[in-house]
Amino acid sequence: MKITKAKYIISAPSLKASPVFNLPEFALIGRSNVGKSSLINAIANNSKLAKTSNVPGKTRLINYFNINDSFIFADLPGYGYAKVSAQIQNEWQKNLENYLLQRRDLICLIHLVDARLPLQKNDLQMNEWIKANNKNCIVAVTKADKISTSKTEKTINDFSLSLGFKAYPFSAVNKQLNAPFIKALEEEISKFTPEIIG
């Protein structure tokens, strides 16, 4: 996959406010600060495309990015960040569930987990939700460059087994690790059939 064009499109608070692009869409879900923005930037070869932050919980909207006019990344608010009110958390959850369950062109969830950490409770809770709602999903094991090469394969296999979805290493630093993940994206995109309207 050669990326020749990538751009930020819009940030939307809900499904109702989200434009329809008629392109295959991937939703990025994961704990706050797991590396969703870094993944987008690495795929797009543009370190400034998606804003990254060391402050968890900064993403509070659904941020849409057009990659190559071929597919859409939807960067969702991270879960597991407690320093917002319960009311805001409940509003996020309602809006995100509506999006994840009803978005027409959403073909696959990308569940990001940190290679350096064991699966967290909220990672497992999200995994249970994905399975309960029969959503298509692949797992991106981020920051894979931060663990030893000898440990990478075991980590990937353990996460695949625990989550029940195929896991792939990903690194915003060592992009050579990303080839299997990018191939998985291409395979998902090839399955997309645009819905004929009217």
Image: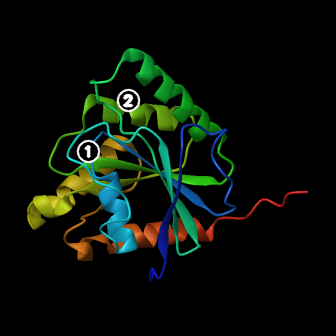
Residue 187 sits above or below residue 121 on the image: below
Percent of width and height locating residue 6: 47, 72
- Where is residue 29, by image quadrant? top left
- Identify the residue under disc 1: 33
Q: Which mark is residue 163?
A: none
- Identify the residue under disc 2: 125
Helix, strand or loop for disc 2? helix
**Is residue 105 toward the left or the right of residue 147 in the image?**
right
Residue at image position (19%, 69%) is: 173
Q: Amino acid at mark 2?
A: Gln
> Looking at the figure, which quarter contains the C terminus?
bottom right
Residue lying furthest right: 198
Q: Amino acid at mark 1?
A: Asn
C-beta proximity under 8 Å, tags 1 and 2: no
Model colouring: rainbow
Residue at image position (20%, 46%) is: 54
Percent of width and height locating residue 184: 45, 67
Residue at image position (11%, 67%) is: 149
The mark nearer the N terminus, 1 or 2, is: 1
Percent of width and height locating residue 110: 43, 52
Residue 133 sits above or below residue 141 on the image: above
